[in-house]
Amino acid sequence: MFTCSNRFGKRALAILALIATCITFNGLTAITAPQRAEAAPITDWQAGYIISDANFYTQGNMSVSQIQTFLNNKGRYCNGSRCLKNYHGNLASFSAGSCPSAVTGGSNLSAAEMIYRVSSACKISAKVLLVTLEKENGLVTSPAWYNSRTGANAFRTALGYGCPDTAPCDAQYFGVGNQLYHAAKQFNIYKKYPNYYNFRSGKTSWVGYNPSSACGGSKVYMRNAATAGLYNYTPYQPNAAALQAGLGTGNSCSSYGNRNFYYLYKAWFGSPRAASKRTVTQAQIKALSPVISDTDLKSGMWNDTVKKLQAAMLLAVPSYPLFTPDGGYGAKTTEIVKQFQSENGLYPSGVVNQKTSYTLLRKGFPVYVFTPHSYYGTLGWGARSDTVTTLQIGAKALFPQWYSAGIDGIYGAKSTAFVKAFQKSKGLSESGTIDEATAQQLRQAEIPISLVAVADPKPIYLRSTLWRGAWNDDVLQVQRALVKKFPQYAQFQPDGGFGAKTEAAVKAVQRANGIYPDGGVGPKTTELFRKNGIEAGMFNSAKSTTALNHGVWNSAVTTLQQGLRKYFPESFPCWPDGGFGAKTEAGVKAVQKHFGLPETGFVDKATADQLRSLGVPLTISAPPEELNQTLNTPLGQWQWNSRVMALQKILKYYFPAQTPYTPDGGYGVGSKAGMIKVQNLLQINPTGAFDQETAAKLQEYGIPLSYK
């Protein structure tokens, strides 16, 4: 609903300004004023909360005489019949429908009388109607100017109803009385049938800065029905330039309608978000009967608990019209709860849940709603969770002799003392920590706390940084690690999916420990896990030109051991240290058994290939071609031929730690020493020569050589 000026509000409008001319250019409108007061920038604008429902949907907040006095004061510089303070006209009668009550019409009524009658019947604040009259056409402070769109003065389109941007104003809505009724009725329709309109309370919507899409906008969460209604009536929000301008001109992308509504209401009547209140004393609050519930309180309930809640809410929201508590959770109870939630930064659901209860308790109102919550792990010192809030609210409601502290959701000294007292009363060990036995007793006492056991994480070794979107066993182990060691940040069931909750927990842990919070699990985060007793790290990508066996000590063995710890921890219960010993050999044999390979205990290419299929980044070169050659026995010192060369290469590949020489085809001192080391490893007679016993043992050990 727009007038020629409503599309962008007043281009330059001051409270005491004399508005002179309505100028239209390029389809836009500016209001020029020969005099205007300079206005300070608007710094308290909230796009999603322009005015409270209590200030908007109310009746009788101004009498006829108060409205007339207000018009006389604000229009004191206006003289003649074109002034709203002097206006008289007709108001038709309208039956109840969209407006809660019928409108009683009349002829030759003053503007003040019409405003009062419409406000009373339609339950739209007279202050809202006065501000709308001003922000649409400046009628409260200035004379009605000639309107080029309607061919008449602005009284005909006083509130801009029936004047869309893209069409002429609709004559059936002309007249001050007509405009007042239909605008007030429309605000009721927005509230009654929100799903038919773009902007709705409790929803986030895109609101542009200007009819031009090139000017952009932002997403706005509509905290209440009144704010949504204003946007449905004038669907733009002020940009930074408009707010900086106060009540003046911004830039080419600025719009002013809702800005001016907020500014004028605040200037004339005080904060639109602060309602007039009844006097409430601490004695009244202390006299309230406690409201105790282990379920959310919501519409449709009818019991004594709701009756007690209604009495508490009337004191908690002293601006809400009085009603008689009757125990029925209906429209009024829902509305007063929504208003409390909106005024305290809560989602206006109209349901008294644990969060709303917590806020009421902080303000001294004895409303104890402790709804069921599960905690993953053992609940104790340092935990921060809604489960702790449930514990504290339940303790304060049911066991005030043991718990009289505040409700903060943090498991500290007072929570520990309560749990100890509770455990003592139940004959449990007074640990101060909630295990399953304590949780079961708390549930029997009607404090609905459940514990969810989480398995200990397996060793975590990663090939690359884990990011949101991953879904695998690595994520599952990381989630378990988070829940086990950082439960104050991670309260969810590990499922192997790296989603929003896991990312939020990782970021929180990183922030708390001085790591840049990128949400990825990489070297720094796995190092943090290690410092907190969780085996974790990044894999070393390693290559080896020889098999891995007893005595080898290098990064390839470290990679091997990391893989064994991750995938075969029962067979290799050791910390990766890079040294190949008996326990590493046992782990390798477990791998070989798992994949159906010969259980040799050394890692050749075939074994490395299978490990790599699991994700262990270990590469072993292929064995030497000489393995296919038949070797003569015996081969011994001082022989020099191709068979010695073949033997040296085979032993070098399978026993690199025992053969520190370079194969050259000559069976010298080094070759003999190496052979003795191999024979000792094989636990046979250390002759230093390659004989049939040695050849047979090598075959038995898993080296596929042939000999004669």
Image: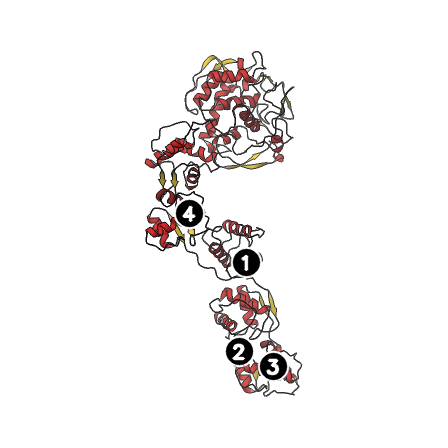
* Mark 3 to mark 4 CA distance (whole Å): 70 Å
User: Can see residue 667?
Assistant: no
Q: Secondary structure at mark 4?
A: helix
Q: Which residue is mark 2?
A: 702
Q: CA distance from mark 4 to mark 1?
A: 34 Å
Ranked by sequence position, the earlier of labels 2 and 3 is 3
> Label 3: which residue?
674
Name the one closer to the observer, 151 or 533.
Answer: 533
Quick one: label 1 or label 2, which is nearer the N terminus?
A: 1
Query: To which quarter of the image does residue 245 belong?
Result: top right
Looking at numbered disc 1 in the image, what kind of residue is underneath it? Thr
Q: Amino acid at mark 4?
A: Lys
Residue 637, picture quadrant? bottom right
Provide the secondary structure element on which disc 3 rests: helix
Report which residue position mark 1 lands on: 526
Label 1: which secondary element: helix
Q: Which residue is mark 4?
A: 414
